[in-house]
Image: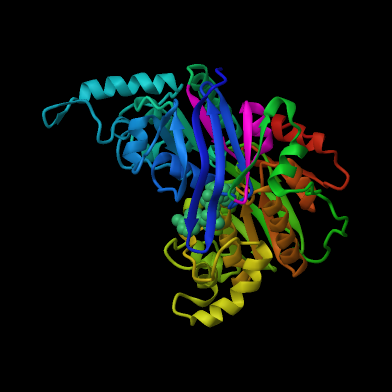
Amino acid sequence: MSDSPLLEMTGIVKRFPGTLACDGANLSVRAGEVHCLLGENGAGKSTLMKILAGSYRPDGGEIRLAGRPLHATSPQDGIAAGISVIYQELDLAPDLTVAQNLFLGRAPARGPFVRRRARAEAAADVIERVGGTFSPADRVGDLPIAAQQLTAIARALTMDAKVIVMDEPSATLGERDLEAVFEVIRGLAAEGRAIIYISHRLDEVSRIGDRATVMRDGRDAGVFEVADTGHDELVAAMIGESRDLVRREDRAVPSGEPRLVIERARVGDILDVSGIDVRPGEIVGLAGLGGAGRTTLLNALFGVVRADVRARLDGDRLPVAGPRTAVRNGLALVPESRKEQGLFLGLGVSRNAAVSALGPLAPRSRGRRMTEPVLAGLGVKHTSADQPVGELSGGNQQKVVLAKWIVRGMRVLLLDEPTRGLDIGAKADLYQQVRRLADDGVAVLLASSELAELTAHADTVWVLHEGRNIARFDPRTAPEADIAHTVITGATP
Ligand SMILES: Nc1ncnc2c1ncn2[C@@H]1O[C@H](COP(=O)(O)OP(=O)(O)OP(=O)(O)O)[C@@H](O)[C@H]1O
Ligand SMILES: [Mg+2]
């Protein structure tokens, strides 16, 4: 790794109406390093990367690449200069093949004709370099998310990118896929490329990062050698103080009749769960590895996957016939993927938060009155009630989804990885809200890959393994290591 920077961004300023997204931000990245970019939701990370890519024009500051000034005024300019940004919402065309996506608009051609054979060969070559096992002819929309992620990385290689930015790739990847992507990232860095990696998960930063720049309020708040820096120090730089974030409040296990009884839920041969109860006021955690069936179970209950479900809600049979029926019965689902969260990006924050409760035609003032306290409680960072949701940072968009359900009210709340993409403070706020809902009598099913979050916030933890619920733990008494062991091995204690 060389010491002189490959990329230098100095004094970057970007104003949006009412927001100073970047306020003199500096970032210096060397060839051959994986440089993590950290910071709370809304700190300006994505904005800084969009400026680098040429998607946004900065209001001030300077960018140098390999010592030369870079003035990208469009993403095409950025690509031509060797910058490739992989956004969390992968901008691949799902209906096209992998090969078509890799060379979109740049296919090897003879006159007006694409040389398909040449394209397929070149595609197969880069797919192999990123360790993909899919074919150039596969339709991107049919591939699992990890393969899509690899396709996006492969595309960066076809462009011969010198700087590759990955904006929260782990928000969509499971643990096994993440390790595969890490392997690829290490290989790319070893070739002398610079990787900028955005994540809220400090364990990932320790695993993949060489250095980290922390952003706070649109500015760089410190540059750290990852190997020499404790998580506490990074957190302190992010939020400006140390804060004890996962604390278990000891409270009585809610008693009384269960609100939701899952007698049996089956989906093909991938899910067969039985005997899970959730009481009003209870948070039941679902632990498990990627693919263990947590998402499938929540989707089955909500009626968004074809499933055979026998369940009771407050003693009555729960009809499962699609999301509308689910909502009518008082179920709410906050899904894992942001794309499916049903936000209207062009509409205001308050409208989005109110739409589920009041419908699209309700008077604005009424929507505002209902949504304001909820948005404030979740700490949604926005400039006005009418600010389009599409202008919010990724993490803040996620909070609006929960706000929407809180405003509407529910009997059962199904949460699928609710803290992905949220910063540390926002996670604490989210769990506080969820606890408040539970205290108001909501029954909560919470799927999470973060065992520490489950043991801190759930009243009961079920472990799912290969589609079955195999063990039930009381997080007050069960050591976290025992739960982790069951999650990984599938062996019950
Ligand atoms: N197109 C836009 N119009 C108006 N404001 C914007 C726009 N894009 C971003 N912002 C604002 O700029 C600030 C920084 O947002 P940015 O998306 O860069 O944050 P981030 O650090 O990537 O956060 P997260 O971790 O939640 O993804 C936020 O307050 C956001 O609302
Ligand atoms: Mg972002």
Count of residue discs: 0
Q: Is residue 36 above or below residue 278?
A: above
Question: Which residue appears at 33% of the width and 42% of the height?
Answer: 93
Quarter of the image where the N terminus is located: top right
Q: Position of residue 14 (x, y in %)?
A: 48, 51
The residue lying toward the viewer, choosing from 4 and 234, is 4
Question: Which residue appears at 40% of the width and 30% of the height?
Answer: 156
Q: Position of residue 390 (x, y in %)?
A: 46, 58
Quarter of the image where the C terminus is located: top right
Q: Is residue 195 above or below residue 297?
A: above
Q: Quadrant of residue 182?
A: top right
The residue lying toward the viewer, choosing from 158 and 120, is 158
Q: Which residues are magenta?
A: 193-217
The residue lying toward the viewer, choosing from 95 and 287, is 95
Q: Position of residue 478 (x, y in %)?
A: 85, 41
In this orientation, does residue 401 appear?
yes
Q: What's the colour scheme? A: rainbow
67 within the magenta span: no
Q: Position of residue 422 (x, y in %)?
A: 63, 49
Residue 491 vs residue 103: left or right? right
Q: Quadrant of residue 376?
A: bottom right
Residue 2 vs residue 154: left or right? right
Q: Is residue 381 above or below residue 189?
A: below
203 within the magenta span: yes
In this orientation, does residue 296 appear?
no
Question: Which residue appears at 74% of the width and 46% of the height?
Answer: 453
